[in-house]
Image: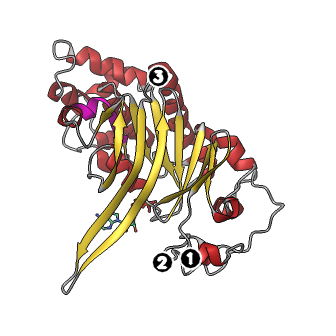
Amino acid sequence: MSKPLLHVNELGKVFSTRSMFRKKQFRAVHDVNFTLEAGEVLAIVGESGSGKSTIARMLTNLIPATSGDIVYNGESLRASRQLRRKLPTFVQMIFQDPFAALNPHHTIGYIIGRPLQVQHIAEGDLQQRVLELLQKVGLTPAEDFIDKYPYQLSGGQKQRVVIAKVLGLAPKVIVADEPTSMLDVSIGVDIMNLLLDLKDKENLALILITHNLGSARYMADRIMVMYAGQMMECGPAEELIHNPQHPYTKLLLYSSPDPWREQSEAFEVIDPQGKVASGTGCSFHHRCPYATDTCRTKPVKIVQIADGHQVRCHLFG
Ligand SMILES: Nc1ncnc2c1ncn2[C@@H]1O[C@H](COP(=O)(O)OP(=O)(O)OP(=O)(O)O)[C@@H](O)[C@H]1O
């Protein structure tokens, strides 16, 4: 069997923090597993603090994992120093704030061209390559943009520059962390369409990190729902939206203002203040209307409920 482009295996992250009197450990991500192929879009969805950005930062090696592994094309990020060195040409990240991502003192041409110089790509014909990248992201005529500074561009144009910069290194995977959340809705849709278009043309794999189930549904083939650092449900996007199984996914859908949400099941949330349950049981049991003693005390395993559809819930054990 061929190796997947990306294989995330039992990934975990524990942050250690130190206050004046004691050291504390916080498990931000645990037991996350998924695979991704070229041309696929996976959306990682969940509320604030569920660990989405921590996963993104581990995938791009901005922070090291404390357990598990990330395997690109069969090469382990943990074991291979060579992979860590060439990682920027394998995976790139787009952040939510294009205003902060671009150095205001440099021209657009320099911002896009510099990583190509650093990685020794297109050295001879740098200007030509930068112009091509500007065209690819729809900043045309490209000659008009190359000498501009970030302050001369709109938010959507800045995000396009960020995408051009990332594309220059010809990554196989792009991790987009809330790429449209700081943009107007219509501009955000343009950026989503651009990413989908580039995904097809360049045969990229995309990981979209978002709070918004609407964006996840629009862009993704598969949606992974996170809660308290764990994957709660993962499945094909349309199936997960129309046939959610985990009580937390149902809560997310019920809380969504989008018109396509199913109205049929009024979902009563228990104790929304006590967000994460401690102890050995399910981390969602505090808020779950179906919780039993088993949910409060026993760790939950992932159950495969249909082809490509997994749930971490005792109700399916
Ligand atoms: N460097 C750090 N040190 C300690 N704790 C951290 C650190 N980075 C993140 N955390 C904690 O890890 C948890 C997960 O954070 P993360 O940023 O991954 O969540 P998120 O789902 O991306 O949230 P948001 O949507 O608000 O960005 C949070 O409780 C956060 O406070």
Q: Which residue is mark 3?
A: 203
Whether residue 280 can be seen here: yes
Please tell me in which quadrant of the rendered image residue 134 appears: top left
Secondary structure type for disc 1: helix
Q: Residues within 10 Å of mark 1 (few under 14, many from 20)?
A: some
Please tell me whether mark 1 or mark 3 is closer to you in this view. 1
* Residue that appears at 23% across and 18% down: 127
Whether residue 96 can be seen here: no
Question: Which badge, 3 or 2, comes first in the chain's sequence?
Answer: 3
* Residue that appears at 35% across and 37% down: 71
Amino acid type, mark 3? Asn
**Is residue 16 shown left or right of residue 315?**
left
Amino acid type, mark 1? Thr
Residue 13, percent from left and from top:
34, 59
* Residue that appears at 79% across and 68% down: 266
* Residue that appears at 57% across and 40% down: 189
Q: Which residue is mark 1?
A: 297
Quadrant (top left/top right/bottom left/bottom right) for the C terminus: bottom right
**Is residue 166 shown left or right of residue 154?**
left
